[in-house]
Amino acid sequence: MFLYSQDDIDRKHYWKEIVELIDYYDIYQSALLYSNLVVNNLDSSGTISLNYKRLSKIAKKAVLLADETIDEHLKLVARLNYLKCLVKQYDCYEELNDTIIKLFSWLDNFNKSYNYQQEDYFLYYMCKLFYADGRRDKKEVEKLKNYIHINLLPVVSPVLKEEYEIIESTLLVERNNFDEIIREKDRLLNSSIENIYNHIDMVNYLGKTKEYISFVSQYKKKGYNENIYRYISIDKYLTTYYYGNYLDNPKNIEIGHLISGLQIRLLYEQNLDKKKIKTIKEEIENLNEKIEYNYSSNKYRIPYLDDIEIPNNSCLLDYYYYYEYDYSKVNFSNTNKIIKSSRFAFYLVESGNKVVRFDDIDADLIAEYVDSFYNTSNLIYLDKLFNLLIVPALPYIEKCETLYISPDCFLSEFSFELLCNDYHNLLEEFIIIYVSSIFDVKSDFYVSIDKPLIIANPEYAINEKKDGVNYLRCTEIEAKYIAKLLKSHYFVSEQANKKILYENCNTTIIHFSTHGDLEEINSDDYNLPLIASMIVLTGFYDWKNDNKIDEYDNGIITAQDISFLTFSALDLVVLSACKSAQGNYDEFNRFKGLRWAFGFSGAKSCITSLFEIDEAFAAIFMIIFYQNLIIYPVAHALHETKKKCMDMDLATIRKNKLFNHILKKRSKDKIFKDDEYPFIEESIIFSFVCNFNGGKYE
């Protein structure tokens, strides 16, 4: 049951009984019984697939116990059984060398007349072969290979012959056979990924995919463009919509709400002493243990590239972040890999789904240029970034109207609209749409304006003192105008609260104009990135100062809150709030934040802000955007708004009575001259980005 059962409770129960029975005997008898248990299962035949990884653990225990006896024969049998388990594990060959060095260092002095079962005798020589190879003793390796070929291979089973061919191809001393080794590793990894993909283990699939992409990218294998891009796309898709998601189970949702409330307290509440913090963390840990994750790929419909069509006059630029490992030893060990560098695999997909692969990009260099630009505003860094991220694709994109961009890791928070050189400017030349993966690509579309929800300028502090509270008066003018344009109501002051959102999940447009924030976190917990991204609504300061008003709850909406909701008809979310496009990353370097949460919960598109934004110029920008939204599809409307605003100097803005009225409400943080261009100076046109979300393929 331990070796075959898929039920954790049954497996643990029966295994505990087996161990208790075996451990009842003395060391010698226990070693013998463990060895027999391994042998019986290795020799068993049946239709159920045996878990050799579990069996290996038993075999290893048999080795440790045998070493405490004086029976040399038992020591050898235990070791041979352990090796046999490792050999039978799929794609385990790279693990064997270290094992042999540790467990069989005494083999050279062992009686060479050992002549028990044929398979054990064959494995014994494989042990010696690996041990000689680990010492880089090429002469001994050749001697053993000749003996195996002449005396053993002719009489062993076809399965062992096939295994031996694979093992021989991975020997370290075969330096002149390097290309063959590379090909064999490729076959093993590729087959392993396909095997996992066609079964159930999502976590193993994601790990193997990253290793394979690193391997193929490092060795620049030609003809692998479409094959490897398939893996990249599915990796992005699974980690965006399924990995870490436990909301498919009503019981989990209830637990998730409890965890969310506790995590919010840790991040935002004032005056928590160490004892209280420890208690809250323990409660979170206990609740996390009750969540039942289901990573079965069979549960979901995994999409195919054929499901997606890149629209005409468009193409997709896809960047995939991975680690380049040090494969200099050629044995490709799966443990303790040394990271040489971090890189972006760079692909382009044209209309018709033709995949083009470019040279991989040094991710550390990209990060250096991005940081340098943000710190200095020196345009030379944008030119350098343009050369790395765009120039290779220029011959393919020059005739396009729309660029879909699928960034990864820290590029998910970079505005590609900033990129330009002496001859090209992405913002002016292309409609830019961001997607998590190719499976989120769809044609630009017209938004239904029948049922908008417009929320602005909340009453952040109701019973608390108003001193120091930064109200956004300009956003109220913005909301009033947009509501008039869309023939709708709008909610401001105390009506701008969480309850309004929860009661209107069937709306087609959601527009927030308020404060946004991103809390810094120092935790690897998956859900904390969702708690740290939030927008502020009515009653926040009351809750923060321990004067919570039940009607308004805690006065914030986090990405975690959004992920609990379902939006069945939501075409567009607009978050005119500082840093609303920022977020954090999970262990697979996938972005998680407010715009991800809305997309996860059903929003077809999101417009959010990467940077801190001036409330007055953001309000004017949004009014122009909604004027365009009546005429154009959503991404096109944003593109036209940016082009118009980048050409508007302060004098032009003031000529509009409504805009001038908004500017008079503006706080005087920075005074502009009439011939200056505030939308550029304040980075408004670079800050707002449009994301399309394909949602989950149920």
Image: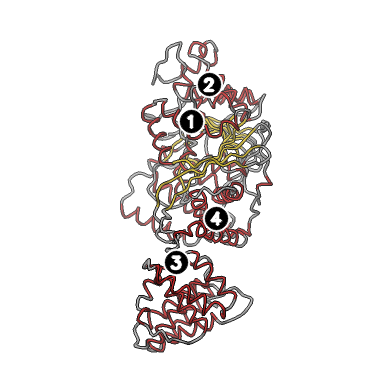
Residue 554 vertical placement versus 588 (above, below) = above
Q: Secondary structure at mark 1?
A: helix
Amino acid found under the numbered disc labelled 2:
Ile
| Residue of label 2 | 620
Tell me the distance, in whole angstroms, between the alpha carbons under discs 3 and 4. Answer: 33 Å
Q: Residue at x 67, y 43 (%)?
A: 308
Mark 2 vs mark 3, foreground winner is 3
Who comes first in sequence, dot 3 or dot 4? 3
Tell me the distance, in whole angstroms, between the alpha carbons under discs 1 and 4. Answer: 39 Å
Mark 1 vs mark 4, foreground winner is 1
Which sits in the foreground, 607 or 478?
Answer: 607
Which sits in the foreground, 221 or 191?
Answer: 221
Residue 95's disc is 3
**Along the horizontal axis of the image, is 54 left or right of 103?**
right
Residue 472 vertical placement versus 97 (above, below) = above
Who comes first in sequence, dot 2 or dot 3? 3
Amino acid found under the numbered disc labelled 1:
Phe
Who comes first in sequence, dot 2 or dot 1? 1
| Total numbered circles | 4
Residue 246's disc is 4
Q: Position of residue 314 (x, y in %)?
A: 64, 33
Residue 386's disc is 1
Q: Position of residue 603 (x, y in %)?
A: 61, 40
Tell me the distance, in whole angstroms, between the alpha carbons under discs 2 and 4. Answer: 40 Å
